[in-house]
Image (tube, rainbow, N blue to C red):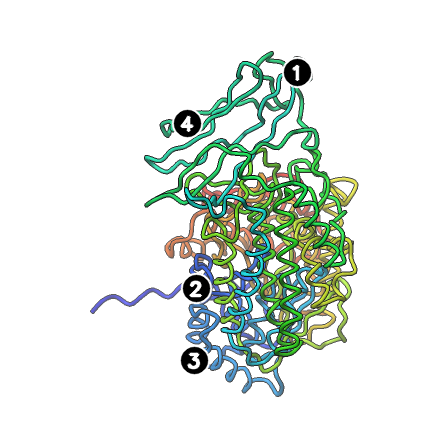
Amino acid sequence: MPPKKKSPVPCPNLHTLPENAQPRLMDKGTLHCLASQGGAKERYGKGKTPHTIHVWWARRPYSAMRTLVFASLDSGESPKSRNLASDLGRLPVSESKDAEAAAKMLSRQYAEPPRVLDMFGGGGAIALEAANLGCKAFSLDSNPLAVFIQKSLLGFTQEAENWPPDLLMESGRRVLERLERETAPLFPMRNSEKGPVQAYFYTYETACPHCGWKFFLSKRPWLSRKKGREACLEFHPGEEHAVYRIIHPSRDYKPSRLWKKTGIVCPVCGRGCGAPNYSQCREVLTALCRGGHGKGKDFEAGSPEAQADSVIMEEMESAVLAYLGQGLPQTKIPKWSGIFNPAIYGMDSHADFLNPRQRLVLLLLMKSLRTEFKALSQSESETVARCMVGLLSGLVDQLIDWNSRLSMWIPQNEQAGRAFCGPGVPMMWDYAEIDPLLNGPANLWKKLDRIVEGAKAIPSFSTAPDVRLGAAQNLPFKDGLFDAIVTDPPYYDNIFYSSLADFFYSWKKMVISILSPELTGFDSTESPRELVASVQRHNSKLDAHESYCRELTQALCEGARVLKESGLISLIYSHSSLNGWDALVKAFRASPFLITSVQPLCIERKARPRGLASGAVNTCLVFVGRKSAKPKHSQCLSELADRLEDIADCGFAQDLISQGWSEEDAGLALFSQGAALLANSSGESTIDDREALALVEYIVASRLSGFKISRRRSL
């Protein structure tokens, strides 16, 4: 007989349950086994969940959140609970058989559907899964774009009831066919005999202030790095001005560089020119891309024939803006070195990051969406129209993210790359513009397919989630209302949500205005209650840190107020810096919550965008807390060290490694146990939190050498 599979080592219990606490499946300490596998798998899937419809950042896999919500509510007394939770973590969101079984199990444990709150709703995954399990779900966010995304997915789709997916595809095709006709004058080479041009490559030209020589600012000249198809732009001085050509070098070819730490260097006189200003540069079309025969694409030098007539574009833009009753966005891009760089180089407003043709295509798309809304309101109903256009507004996200002056070209796979994947936005001195109505890179037809597939995965709820615009620090709910709080707050300074969201909101609100007009009365999505450690918003790094501590403390205190005495909070968090953990410790300590366990989830994509200078890991942690009226006890460093040593010796971290977790991720799971023990202390002893966290790091690193906590300050 084959040997029995070894049972996983559960997460340690850090504190006994308070008297009024209701035991839950979460208290078994095996969430990492139940949810991580399905969550990680879902991260690599494409077009199978509602995440693919709209752009939002750092969203959690639905499968993992489904398991987390269930484990946060279920009593864990039934032998079936653990198996059911494990099945929930592996299913796609659209396969509801086990979700229905879980909902029935919960209904037998509660006199009425349990109430679940997500205080930081973001993209809405937690609220969707809570409603999917038959709960009364409530979701709050201070960002109006996040609230619109949730209303589109969780509200409009339920109000329209049994809308057919075929209608969404038909409607989307009408929108794109109309857009294709209206953009025809903008792309003279769309119907070229040599084949349509799918992408256009640009860089900038500037003049040396010393010798007057004009040269190019290209930093990313590669067009293709596919083996055997290498293509690169080569720039060099000509007789009168700089010139360029497409070459086909070997893979180890290294283009010449003009950029130094202090700015650019003139290739003729060799003198430093400082940092260039985008508004004083000339934009140059350098290359064109056509669909190749067989594998890869064909590249050729740019041509004036590929450009649209500027007078025609100006006239069309004025006409579209008049139809929409709007002007171009006047909001400013943050000037934030190392985080949001475009404004540092003179790209000031949210109208500047698109070139005239990209901007006009975007405006024509919003015109087409509004036209479709009017037509559907007459042929179907306004409710159905709101549902269809709310989902199809994800096409706007596609254009903004993949077709702007900040969108890069990825030569390794000859595809357009995202501009706004976070955590910041670099300035691009080379960018790719696409024709989004062709069957080429980042086209809208493929995006429509993904929208339809994602929409099919949205369940029908017995009760639609209650989605609200508001701040977690001032919850609009009465005391003791919720059975569980399951939430995923911003992680200190990992993502600056409002600054990223404004690139979308400044344009997308032209469509949001006909769907949710109450969400469009803002110049910016930034809120003074946004939870983020931002030096840009505060006077210093210390002020940014203290503000985050204060606001997270207030949110946790508000969460405790609206949570039932028997309830539970499951708060997801992770960070790579000592400051990020210090903030979490201080906030939990100042709240009425005791942390009873910390359970890791390995649900991140290995190749996801990394935090600047952060050495980000692939694990996030679920802090499970209960309300307690008793004062927290003081403890000394030796007591903290002894307790953490005991936890380390129980084999929990080594068991994670045996399951395939990296030392870095397993180390973070162990480190979080020490941080939770510190948060459960009163802080009235001689312990300095940063000193204590450094000791916790030392204990973890002595067992797992791959683990390290950064000492960087807030960004």
Amino acid beneath label 4? Ile
Between the C-alphas of marks 4 and 1, the distance is 27 Å
Residue with the mark numbered 4: 247
Q: Position of residue 237 (x, y in %)?
A: 53, 17
N-term-proximal mark, 2 vs 4: 2
Residue drawn 53% across the image and 66% down it? 65
On residue 314, the disc is none
Amino acid beneath label 2? Gly
Amino acid beneath label 1? Gly
Assess whether mark 3 and mark 2 are in contact (beta carbons under 8 angstroms). Answer: no
Between the C-alphas of marks 2 and 3, the distance is 21 Å
Residue with the mark numbered 1: 212
Between the C-alphas of marks 3 and 1, the distance is 79 Å
Residue drawn 50% across the image and 65% down it? 49
Between the C-alphas of marks 1 and 2, the distance is 60 Å
Task: For mark 3, give the secondary structure.
Answer: loop
N-term-proximal mark, 4 vs 1: 1
Q: Quadrant for residue 251, please give it.
A: top left
Assess whether mark 4 and mark 2 are in contact (beta carbons under 8 angstroms). Answer: no
Residue with the mark numbered 2: 38
Q: Is residue 208 left or right of residue 448?
A: right
Assess whether mark 4 and mark 3 are in contact (beta carbons under 8 angstroms). Answer: no
Q: Visible in this render: residue 65?
A: yes
Task: For mark 2, give the secondary structure.
Answer: helix
Assess whether mark 1 and mark 3 are in contact (beta carbons under 8 angstroms). Answer: no
